[in-house]
Structures are given as structure tokens and as C-alpha cells.
Image (cartoon, rainbow, N blue to C red):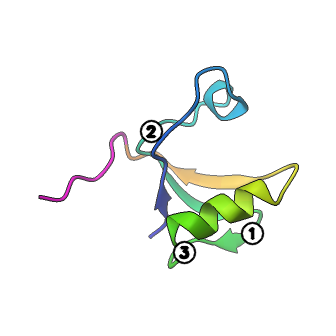
């Protein structure tokens, strides 16, 4: 599956590159996020100076009642 983007800071590089709240990050620097937690994804991002991500546009965060 992947990890949904829950926040994109205005003016950030992610924002400038077109990342949107609700997008699903599938891979970070080749690491598959199919079974990763949000915490693990944040750790992978924060450990890198340069990152390459594979993103699937979803358009909105999933909502669970």
C-alpha cells in the first residue's frame, strides 16, 4: 500500500515539487513502504539529505468512520 501524506508545509521543497496532502508515498530511496508505518517513513525521510520518492496521486486522505 504505502504511507499517506498528512501535511505539506507551504513553501517547502515537497510543496514546490507538487506533493499534496492525501498523496501516497510508495517508496523512499528504493525502500518499499507497502508495510511501513508512518513513523518509519518519517524516519527514512529525516535520515537522508537527498531523497527520491515514488508517489501515487490519491487526491484526499482516506476517511474511516
Mark with earlier residue (3, 2): 2
Taking the magenta stretch, the answer to whether it contains residue 64 is yes
Q: Position of residue 43 (x, y in %)?
A: 69, 63
Taking the magenta stretch, the answer to whether it contains residue 7 is no
Q: CA distance from mark 2 to mark 1?
A: 22 Å
Report which residue position mark 2 lands on.
Answer: 21
Report which residue position mark 3 lands on.
Answer: 36
Q: Secondary structure at mark 2?
A: loop
Residue 39 higher or lower than 34, as above or below: above
Q: Position of residue 20 (x, y in %)?
A: 49, 35
Query: Looking at the magenta stretch, what is its main secondary structure?
Result: loop
Q: Residue furthest left?
A: 65
Report which residue position mark 1 lands on.
Answer: 30
Q: Does residue 28 appear in the picture of this structure?
A: no
Q: Which residue is depicted at the point 57% across and 37% down? A: 19
Q: Does residue 2 appear in the picture of this structure?
A: yes
Amino acid at each position: 500500500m504505502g504511507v499517506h501524506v498528512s501535511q505539506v508545509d507551504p513553501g517547502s521543497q515537497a510543496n514546490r515539487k507538487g506533493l499534496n496532502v492525501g498523496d501516497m508515498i510508495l517508496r523512499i530511496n528504493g525502500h518499499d513502504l507497502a508495510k511501513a508505518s508512518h513513523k518509519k517513513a518519517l524516519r527514512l525521510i529525516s535520515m537522508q539529505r537527498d531523497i527520491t520518492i515514488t508517489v501515487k496521486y490519491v487526491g484526499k486522505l482516506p476517511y474511516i468512520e
